[in-house]
Each structure stands twice: as C-alpha cells, then as structure tokens.
Image (spheres, rainbow, N blue to C red):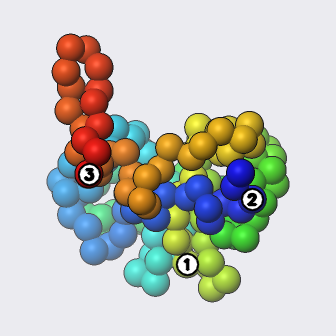
C-alpha cells in the first residue's frame, strides 16, 4: 500500500510552460484526454491551472500566464496519501501537483489514483508510464492496453 504521493504520482504528466506552442499543448491534452493542465514557470514551479477554453483563446503560451488562470492545489512529494486526499477534498480539485523541496513540479496525482491508494487498491500506473502513453487501442468496444 502506498504511503506517500511520490509512490503513486504520474511523473510524465502534461503541463503548460513557456516552451510550448499552443497547438502542441492542445494536441498533448487531447492525446491524454484531459481538459486542464498545470501551468509551470520556466523553472518548473506551478503558477496556476489552465483549461482548454483558457488555452484556445491564446495566441502564445505566454498569454496563458498573463491571462486569467485558475488556482492550483499542490502538495509535497513526501505528503502522506491520507493527507493528500484531505487536501484534494478541501481544495475542491480533481488533481494535485506534486512538488519537491524546492517547489519544482515533479508529478501529478489525480483523484482516481488517490482514491485507489486510500482504499488500498493497486496503483494503475505501470513502470512510471501514464495510461495515455502506454499504447492502447480500441477493440470491440473495449480499450486494450499493450503489455509493453
């Protein structure tokens, strides 16, 4: 059973930074089937959260941080799973950005993974590769995940 969020976080999460292009960011979000992303500064520190609607109205990624971005909830990578679940619930969020001792974003944990950890279920992450990058395919109405 996972004790800290570092054990269940997705290290390969999608985020927005000034190094991105708007079309590239929107493609990565669509590929991961997500409607919002953490916005990180050039040092990798979280500054807020942007939705697809926020991003679509921008011409450059810098416009995201200059515009109206939403509040973001973050926790330390050493935060216990139980404490993170309370933070998620109190913050009325659907995910938590996980930061290291310097405040740099090192991962993301979503509500479903956190719930699995609190209930003692196995984490669905495999080999630190997120579901969106594991190479799945649709077949007969079901999503099949490749073993590799």
**Which is in the foreground here, disc 3 or disc 1?**
3
> Mark 2 touching mark 1, by CB under 8 A?
no
Please state the horizontal and vertical placement of residue 59, each as a whole percent of the image. 22, 58
Residue on which disc 3 sits: 148
Say the numbered circle drawn on residue 3: 2
Please state the horizontal and vertical placement of residue 61, each as a whole percent of the image. 30, 64
Which sits in the foreground, 117 or 76?
117
Specify whether 27 is left or right of 4. left
In this view, 42 is above or below 124: below
Determine whether the residue tagged by mark 1 lies in a helix, strand or loop. loop
Q: Earlier in the sequence, mark 2 or mark 1?
A: 2
Specify whether 79 is left or right of 128. right
**Which is in the foreground here, disc 2 or disc 1?**
2
**Which is in the foreground here, disc 3 or disc 2?**
3
Specify whether 117 is left or right of 62. right
Which residue is painted at 29% across and 20% down in the image?
A: 142
Mark 3 to mark 1 CA distance (whole Å)? 30 Å
Do we see residue 30 in this rendering?
Answer: no
Residue on which disc 1 sits: 104
Which residue is painted at 20% across and 32% down in the image?
A: 137
């Amino acid at each position: 059973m996972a004790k800290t969020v570092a054990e269940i976080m997705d290290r390969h999460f999608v985020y927005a930074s000034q190094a991105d292009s708007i079309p590239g960011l929107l493609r990565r979000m669509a590929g991961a089937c997500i409607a919002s992303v953490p916005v990180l500064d050039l040092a990798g520190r979280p500054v807020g959260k942007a939705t697809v609607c926020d991003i679509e109205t921008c011409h450059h990624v810098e416009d995201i941080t200059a515009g109206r971005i939403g509040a973001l909830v973050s926790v330390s990578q050493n935060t216990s799973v139980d404490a993170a679940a309370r933070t998620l619930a109190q913050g009325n969020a659907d995910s938590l950005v996980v930061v290291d001792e310097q405040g740099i974003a090192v991962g993301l944990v979503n509500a479903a993974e956190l719930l699995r950890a609190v209930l003692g279920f196995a984490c669905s992450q495999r080999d630190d590769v997120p579901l969106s990058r594991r190479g799945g395919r649709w077949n007969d109405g079901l999503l099949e995940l490749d073993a590799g």
